Image (cartoon, rainbow, N blue to C red):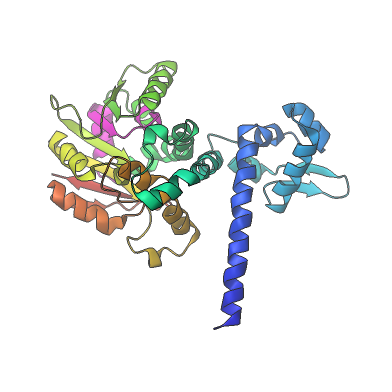
Amino acid sequence: MNPKKAEEIAFRVVGDMGGAFTMAMGYVGDRLGLFKAMAGAGPMRSPNLAARTQLNERYVREWLRAMVAAEYVEYEASTDMYRMSEEQAFVLANEDSPLFVGGAFHFTTPSICNISKIVEAFQKGGGIPYSEIGDEIPHAIERFFRPGYINFLTTMWLPAVPGLVAKLERGAAIADVGCGGGQSTIAMAKAYPKSHVLGIDYHGPSIERAKTQAKNAKLGNVEFLRAAAHEIPKDKKFDLICSFDCIHDMVDPKATLKAIHGALADDAVYVWSEPNASANAHENRNPVGKAFHAISPMHCMTVSLAYNGAGLGTVIGEQGARALAREAGFRQFERLAIDNPFNQFFALRK
């Protein structure tokens, strides 16, 4: 045995423990508005922050100390004051920032609260249906992905497909499969007012939230359908179908991809994103790969296995995506040249 390697493993576990508890404290700060209360407010002491947020000062003080240790908040020892830097506020408090991480806090902690159900699934099989995963989690997922949709979907991701934006600007039929709360759907409807965008998701509360958000945005070119992913309307053909980070979650991903294939117009394109990781776990020894693989049994795999589904898990990689595409009948499969640390993007054609 190599004692040095054993020591490294032990300290890695302690580091991960600190990360897990820090995520929980990040969740507290995000949900109780502590980060937002500090953003742009300048230096303050814990009583000031407690008064501003109407929270208990002793807990606020200890939260601040934890955030200083995590380097999420700055501390000025000479004045005993805390503040958020511009960069910290950009990441932790600005929901429209491309680097906003509040959704990560929001998603992680409630997911870990399901651990007793996951332990039972390890013992007995099955899983946790999406409808029972927890009331917070669908909204948390929406917040997690929203920065990408509002900042990059129509400016970087779709423009990576040659000629696609011009078609959408002229007016096209778009379907957004697995749209959740509709952030991606609404982003496309705003960017391409001459196109009609249909968002499809089977989770009722998410569809209702999507409808409300579209109404608030006063969009007349978007609609939402509560339906399983493979139940794409058969009475029309679509010029663009999208699915973002959801195929791997599905009960029957093959049926969904076959339905997408059948719903495409002859000259249409299907844009599909998956987590940016290899199908081989040993090639994902990095912070992003580590997160994806740990999330898988806690969320993505379990919501599929709850219905005796395929249970693909979070990470299928380009290799898995290509295999699914072939089985669904797609003849053309291209990995798009999009530099993104979290996602890989594919363009498929009939």
Q: Is residue 70 above or below residue 29?
A: below
What is the residue that sits farthest to the right in this orientation?
78
Read off the magenta span: 159-186
Residue 164 sits inside the magenta stretch: yes
Quarter holding the N terminus?
bottom right
- Compared to residue 56, the image places residue 126 above or below, namely below
* x, y percent for residue 179: 34, 32
The residue lying toward the viewer, choosing from 41 and 316, is 316
- Residue 133 sits in which quadrant? top left
Q: Position of residue 254 (x, y in %)?
A: 19, 45
Which quadrant is the C terminus positioned in?
A: top left
Residue 330 visible to an observer of this rendering: no
Question: Who's the residue at 47% across and 30% down the image?
Answer: 135
What residue is rendered at 13% in x and 27% in y? Answer: 234
Tell me if residue 280 can be seen.
Answer: yes
> What is the tally of numbered marks visible in this picture?
0
Q: Is residue 106 left or right of residue 177?
A: right
Residue at the spot x=29%, y=24% of the render? 226
- State the image coordinates of residue 195 (x, y, percent, origin top left): 27, 25
Q: Is residue 203 left or right of residue 227?
A: right
The x and y percentages for residue 300 are: 37, 45
Q: Which residue is rendered at x = 45% and y = 50% of the image?
A: 119
- Residue extending farthest front: 124
Quarter of the image for residue 54 reads top right
| 40 over 120 or under it: above or below | above
Closer to us: 6 or 268: 6
Observer-nearest of 164 and 147: 147
